[in-house]
Image: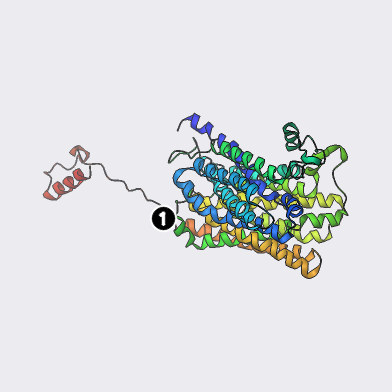
Amino acid sequence: MSTETGNNRWKILAGALIVQIVLGTVYAFSVFVKPLQMEFGWDRTTTQLAFSFALVTFAITMIPAGRLQDRIGPRKVASIGGILLGLSFLLGSVLVSESRPWTLYLTYGIIGGAGIGFAYVCPIASAMKWFPDKKGLVTGLSVAGFGAGALFFAGPASTLLLSPGLGGETIGLSQVLHIALGISKGSGFGIGWQTFFILHGVTSAILVIAGASLLSNPPAGWQPPGWKTHSSQIKPAVDTEWKEMLNTPLCCMLWLTFIFGATSGLMAIGQWKPLMGNILHGKTFAPEWMGTFGRFVEPVGILAIFNALGRIFWGKVSDFIDRPRAMMIMFLFQGMAFMMLVSVESHLAVFLASAWVGLNFGGNFALFPSATADYFGTKNIGMNYGWVFTAYGVAGILGPVVGGVLYDATGAYVMAFLFAGILCFIAAGCSVVVWSLARSQTQRKPEAIPVEIPAPIEDMDVYPERETVPSPVMNRECASTAELR
């Protein structure tokens, strides 16, 4: 391939970040809760169900989306995702009402979740195909935006979602832009949830489609010029179909490891804001002069920032020491952090704990897609990782539910974090099994042995001591050799 094609692969990361930042706003669902409760008088369970529907649909939709991505490419599939995501908010602004909470589940939960599932897998698959030499790093970069999207979205959205002022007064477009960029705090009123749904729906669709236009798959057989597999990395895997992949013990163990690791993280993160609020006694890290940017130095903001950075960090580390070793170290560190959280009291400890937990949790989303590509190839990575990612759908249900049950049963956060730590240690043990199974799979792969075909005897002078007339047997051998030619 030409150098130009090799250089153009970096634009894939730009498209990936644009798409993922928009999709990552799904984790800011909490900003919708209070406005919808005030508008319709719904309870917390009613609103939270929409978020659960979105996460489950997101995980399930990645399977057909991944298959479609492998067939027709990432650009079209990610664009479909952007259209679905935008449509979910536009329909929600019209259909959602007090007597019809199910319309929120249908629009935001199912249609929006499907949009995220269609678009999410495309940047990951495209980046890994263009960067076989930096799988971990570029996967981390591709999904870093997803971890940070909620951080950039939540602050401005919480202001814009406020009801219009007296007499239906609303803020102007210029002030909307200032609030969206974090420059202004607003004037105590916003544009209302319906107008915000329309604005967010149109913006999301446009940005995802724009990012998708930068995505593409490389030509078949393309490799970076001069690329050689690092000695510590898994050798390029044979491209495996999803049915064959699901029948391997390696895939099953990878799936279980993902469940344990993600469940522990979601269990803790779901309790993070109230836990840190109790420790800080309602105080804030942010000085007054930071204004709306103060959210970046709050415990949840710190966790979100390091969640994004952790995807890049652990992805890069895994390029050097391989995926299972990186998983094992990451889960051990995370487990120890959860065990020590029960004694956290100082502001410095809160800051460090938020950064550490976010850093390690984010690594899940760089290591597992990279490991899937390592062991089962990149040709079908969209479909294959879609199946592996269903583990996150399971964790999305188990983590918050188990964490909530443990808190309700004990009235404290100690048991939830201790249990999360235990799950991390189990995930670290599973990583060792993944490493062992991966080595066994590599050793079982038959290697092609080159067979040298002797050149035909065209000059009898090569045997100077033999000047006899060739026998019929030699004639047959020569004939056979001629046929080989």
Write the residue at 79% across / 44% down. 295
Residue 327 drawn at (x, y percent): 63, 55
Residue 208 appears left or right of 158:
left
Percent from the top left, x then y, of residue 311?
Answer: 65, 47
Seen in the picture, residue 302 relative to 4 is either above or below; the reply is below
Q: Nearer the viewer, residue 299 or 202?
A: 202
Quarter holding the C terminus is top left
Q: Secondary structure at mark 1?
A: loop
| Residue 424 shows in the view | no
Which x, y percent locates residue 110?
59, 54
- Which residue is tagged 1? 446
Image position of 94 (left or right of 379): right
Q: Position of residue 231 (x, y in %)?
A: 54, 46
**The N terminus lies in quadrant:** top left
Count of marks, rendered view: 1
- Picture quarter containing residue 478? top left
**Residue located 54% across and 62% down the image:** 252
Q: Is residue 473 visible?
A: yes
In depth, the one of 205 and 270 nearer the eye is 205
Instruction: Name the residue rendered at 72%, 42% in the picture.
Output: 152
| 433 left or right, relative to 409 | left
Few, some or many C-alpha atoms within 10 Å of disc 1 (few <14, some 14-19, many ≥20)? few
